[in-house]
Amino acid sequence: MTAQLEVDLTSGVPAFEQIRAQVVAHVAAGRLVAGDRLPTIRALATDLGLAAGTVARAFRELEAEGVVETRRRAGTVIAEGASVPTDLARRAAETYVSAVRAAGLTDDEALVLVHGALLGRQSVTPTSTGSGSSSTPKDDRTPSRT
């Protein structure tokens, strides 16, 4: 496998979902192509410091989505015609990255905005310092003192 996978154990996103999303992103970006072999479940679990069942769940979900297929003796490989984001979505993502770069935001700040948009929050704003620190979403549920 040529693409690197990482898991943030402090994230609120389950580890299996982080693995699944990263594999899909690598396929969408062309870093993983049909026939590319993924590490074995045990090897990847060891590398990431996870339980084998966690990695197995990610692989099962990827297989159910048609992104990978498991072949006897060949292991788990990227499927031919793997279902990935459409060209329209890919172009939108590239446009977003260009806008983020032009605005001087860090990757973490850009991801905070995307995460907020996916959750439907309008109040998520990154820091404007471009210092590399990611901001935390504003919690609208905090009681105000009047």
Image (cartoon, rainbow, N blue to C red):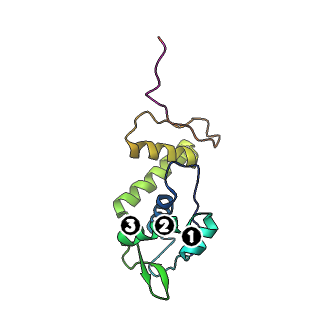
Q: Which residue is mark 2?
A: 23
Q: CA distance from mark 1 to mark 3?
A: 16 Å
Looking at the rendered structure, the secondary structure element under dot 1 is loop
Please say if the residues under marks 1 and 3 sit with CB atoms less than 8 Å apart: no
State the quadrant of the N terminus. Answer: bottom right
Indicate whether 55 appears above or below 77: above
What kind of residue is marked 2?
Answer: Val
Looking at the rendered structure, the secondary structure element under dot 3 is loop
Badge 1 or badge 3: first in the primary sequence:
1
Indicate whether 64 appears above or below 93: below
Q: CA distance from mark 2 to mark 1?
A: 8 Å
Q: In the shown orientation, is residue 42 left or right of residue 122?
A: right
Circle 2 Cα neighbour tier, 10 Å, few/some/many (<14 / 14–19 / ≥20): many
Quick check: is 141 in the magenta stretch? yes
Q: Which mark is residue 3?
A: 1
Residues in magenta?
A: 138-145
Circle 3 Cα neighbour tier, 10 Å, few/some/many (<14 / 14–19 / ≥20): some
Q: Nearer the viewer, residue 105 or 83?
A: 83
Q: Which residue is mark 3?
A: 84
Please say if the residues under marks 2 and 1 sit with CB atoms less than 8 Å apart: yes
At which x and y percent is residue 116?
Answer: 44, 42
What kind of residue is marked 1?
Answer: Ala
At which x and y percent is residue 3?
Answer: 56, 70
What kind of residue is marked 3?
Answer: Val
Q: Nearer the viewer, residue 101 or 1?
A: 1
The residue located at (39%, 46%) in the rendering is 118
Toward the bottom, the furthest residue is 73
